Image (tube, rainbow, N blue to C red):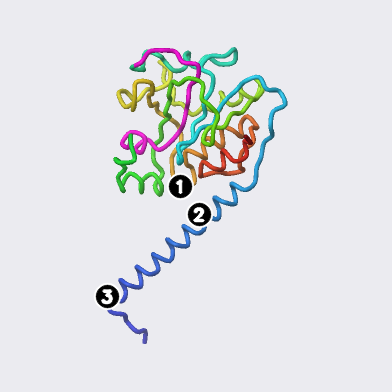
């Protein structure tokens, strides 16, 4: 005859098993992420015609590109009239991420546990953050990359494919920018712990054969292979 455990012991046993599974998942995730970051793909372009930047705020990465070039005029995709400060700048930064996190967390002080848990563990809607800026300065958190026009066209095509388009163009999320020079736009894809903002950046870099990690859920994987 099977021994029937008291309800209290069943609860404790269930909690212990759940905790073990959670710790096991965290360990697997860290090992998986570190393994993906260690190995690189892509190569440095011998033809250096376009200068782009990959910047990091410690958690999130953006790709910074010339606002206007013979290959792409971003102001033909992004309507300057959507911005509070309607001034053309030399560069434009684009990053992808969890829509709820983007819109509800302008600063870390406003981060809610529910927002973080939803972003990490549940597939959730996404958005693109677009910022107008002057030419970035290379540093520890901003890496400069010079590529050919051919590679740049591939990068642009990959990024443009992430925007949700309507008959009127890309779909603005109105009145949700943080500052005078940024906006949010509807994006394709779902965000979760294996498809983070850095995975999107990683995919964009790989589309243009720019050196990067084979897989990168963390920003370091997108920066460490770019060189000085």
Q: From the viewer's perspective, tell me whether residue 150 is left or right of residue 4.
A: right
Q: Helix, strand, or loop for circle 3?
A: helix
What separation in Å lies between label 3 and label 2 (alpha carbons)? 31 Å
Give the labeled residue for mark 3. 8
Q: Quadrant of residue 127?
A: top left
- Asked if disc 1 and disc 2 are in contact, CB closer than 8 Å, the reply is yes
Nearer the N terminus, badge 3 or badge 2?
3
Residue 77: in magenta span: no
Q: Helix, strand, or loop for circle 2?
A: helix
**What residue do we see at 51% from left, 41% from top?**
219
Nearer to us in this view, 157 or 142: 142
Quadrant of the snapshot with the N terminus: bottom left
**What residue do we see at 58% from left, 26% from top?**
155
On residue 29, which mark appears? Answer: 2
The tally of labels here is: 3
Give the labeled residue for mark 1. 193
x, y (%) of residue 166? 41, 20
Q: Is residue 181 above or below residue 228?
A: above
What separation in Å lies between label 1 and label 2 (alpha carbons)? 9 Å
x, y (%) of residue 33? 54, 50
- The residue lying furthest to the left in this view is 7
**What residue do we see at 49% from left, 46% from top?**
194
Nearer the N terminus, badge 1 or badge 2?
2
How crowded pointer 2 is (Cα within 10 Å; few <14, some 14-19, many 20+) is rated as some
Q: Is residue 150 above or below residue 228?
A: above
What separation in Å lies between label 1 and label 3 (alpha carbons)? 33 Å
- Extent of the magenta region: 85-105
How crowded pointer 1 is (Cα within 10 Å; few <14, some 14-19, many 20+) is rated as some
């Amino acid at each position: 005859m099977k021994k029937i455990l008291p309800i209290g012991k069943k609860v404790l046993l269930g909690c212990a098993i759940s905790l073990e599974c959670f710790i096991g998942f965290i360990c697997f995730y860290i090992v998986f992420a570190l393994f993906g970051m260690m190995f690189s793909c892509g190569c440095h372009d011998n033809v250096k015609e376009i200068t782009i930047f990959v910047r990091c705020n410690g958690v999130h990465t953006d790709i910074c590109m010339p606002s206007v070039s013979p290959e792409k005029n971003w102001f033909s995709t992004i309507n300057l009239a959507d911005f509070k400060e309607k001034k053309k700048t030399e560069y434009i930064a684009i990053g992808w991420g969890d829509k709820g996190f983007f819109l509800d967390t302008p600063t870390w002080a406003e981060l809610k546990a529910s927002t973080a848990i939803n972003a990490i563990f549940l597939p959730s809607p996404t958005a693109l953050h677009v910022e107008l800026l002057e030419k970035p300065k290379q540093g520890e958190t901003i890496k400069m990359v010079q590529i050919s026009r051919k590679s740049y066209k591939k990068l642009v095509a990959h990024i443009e494919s992430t925007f949700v388009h309507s008959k009127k163009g890309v779909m603005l999320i109105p009145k949700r920018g943080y500052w005078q020079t940024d906006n949010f736009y509807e994006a394709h894809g779902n965000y979760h712990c294996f498809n983070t903002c850095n995975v999107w950046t990683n995919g964009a870099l790989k589309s243009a054969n720019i050196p990067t990690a084979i897989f990168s859920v963390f920003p370091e994987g997108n920066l460490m292979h770019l060189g000085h």
